[in-house]
Image (spheres, helix red, strand yellow):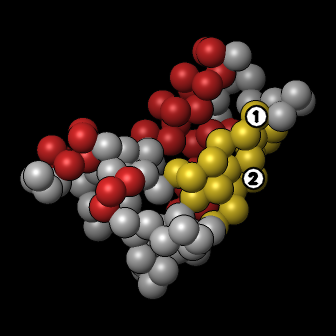
Amino acid sequence: MDRLTDGIVAALKSVYDPEIPADIYELGLIYRVDIADDRTIAIDMTLTAPGCPVAGEMPGWVENAVSAVPGVAGCNVTMVFDPPWDQSRMSDEARIALDMW
């Protein structure tokens, strides 16, 4: 299970918001990752802004990245906007990349 979890996190870190030079995981856009007994993955994610130009595409990018992880049986991504994203959700790594200290 640890290997699967590590693979999912690595897959999430491979997806970048095209307008921000940081990955969606470090930006804090991933709100929930559930791994079911049958190894299907359910992800709740958000965007930095509801009007993001890639809002329609990004869930597919996440589904494709996570579905490619060995051992994952499938992935479903749900876009949520509650609670709204804010900069406090960013990791220190993202803050460094964006020079937001």
Among the 4 quarters of the image, the one containing residue 88? bottom left
* Category of crowding for the residue at label 2, using alpha-carbon neighbours closer than 10 angstroms: few (below 14), some (14–19), many (at least 20): some
Q: Is residue 14 visible to the viewer in this orientation of the structure? A: no
In this rendering, the label closer to the viewer, 2 or 1: 1
Among the 4 quarters of the image, the one containing residue 39? top right
Q: What element carries label 1?
A: strand
Answer left or right for 100 relative to 48.
Answer: left
Quadrant of the image containing the N terminus: top right
Answer left or right for 1 relative to 26.
Answer: right
Q: Which of these two is toward me, 87 or 99?
A: 87
Residue at the image position 57 percent from the left and 73 percent from the top = 81
Can you identify the residue that label 2 sits on?
Answer: 76
Give whichever of discs 2 and 1 has the lower sequence position: 1
Amino acid type for the residue under numbered disc 1: Ile
- Extreme-right residue of the structure: 38
Q: Do the residues labelled 2 and 1 touch (CB within 8 Å)?
A: no
Can you identify the residue that label 1 sits on?
Answer: 35
Residue at the image position 48 percent from the left and 80 percent from the top = 50
Q: Which of these two is toward me, 15 or 47?
A: 47
Q: At which x and y percent is residue 15?
A: 44, 48
Q: Residue 82 carries which label?
A: none
Q: What element carries label 2?
A: strand
Amino acid type for the residue under numbered disc 2: Asn
Q: In this view, does 93 lie above or below 99?
A: above
Residue at the image position 76 percent from the left and 34 percent from the top = 35
Residue at the image position 45 percent from the left and 84 percent from the top = 51
Q: At which x and y percent is residue 62?
A: 58, 51
